[in-house]
Amino acid sequence: MHQGNHRDHEGAKKLFELVKDIKVAMMTTADADGKLYSRPMWSQDTDENGDIWFFTKLHSPKTAEISKDNQVNLAYSDPSSQTYVSIAGKAEIVTDQALVDDKWSESMKTWFPNGKDDPEVALIRIHPEKGEYWDSPNATALHIYGYVKAALTGESPKTETKKVDLV
């Protein structure tokens, strides 16, 4: 499944820069009937290839859904900075203990009280394929400026929006 470094594609650097400090992503998967389900997931760092990692329980509805349809979407939101990012990609369940050990942090005990050696601990690797971001500079100043500009000129402030192809 691994297809090289998708951080090198145009726009990818900014996209990954925007999500690096947002710790929770909403991960959306599809069930066997095609119904979409989203749940908050604690993001691990992206790796050198731009793959995004999450811890999960090996036997869970989301891993069953990924096993049947590995297309997922990640939605990141930081309203305080007016940053919004959507990443679509392919998910893979990873049970490699060396990778679990490498990515483990003590804070993961919140969800896995038996520690990293629990056989239910697994990883989800997301290989991003497409992304889109909406980025507005300084939300409060922009809002005040935008209000005044709209009142005086009838024009709304500009938000940077970009679609990014990651494959």
Image (cartoon, rainbow, N blue to C red):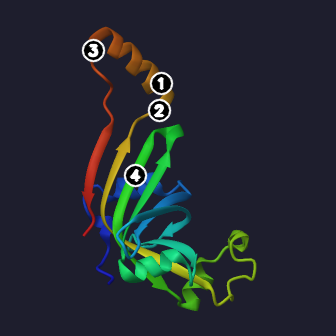
Quick check: 40 above or below 50? above
**Mark 1 Cα shell of 10 Å, populated few (<14), some (14-19), many (≥20):** few
Dot 1 amino acid type: Ala
Select label 3 or label 2 by which is in front.
3
Sooner in the amino-acid sequence: mark 3 or mark 2? 2
Distance CA(mark 4)–CA(mark 1)? 21 Å
Helix, strand or loop status at disc 3:
loop
Dot 4 amino acid type: Val
Distance CA(mark 4)–CA(mark 2)? 17 Å
Select label 4 or label 2 by which is in front.
4
> Which residue is identified by label 2?
138
> Which residue is identified by label 3?
154
Helix, strand or loop status at disc 4:
strand
Residue 85, numbered label? 4
Q: Quadrant of the N terminus?
A: bottom left
Dot 3 amino acid type: Gly
Distance CA(mark 3)–CA(mark 2)? 21 Å
Residues tagged 3 and 2 counted as in contact (Cβ below 8 A): no
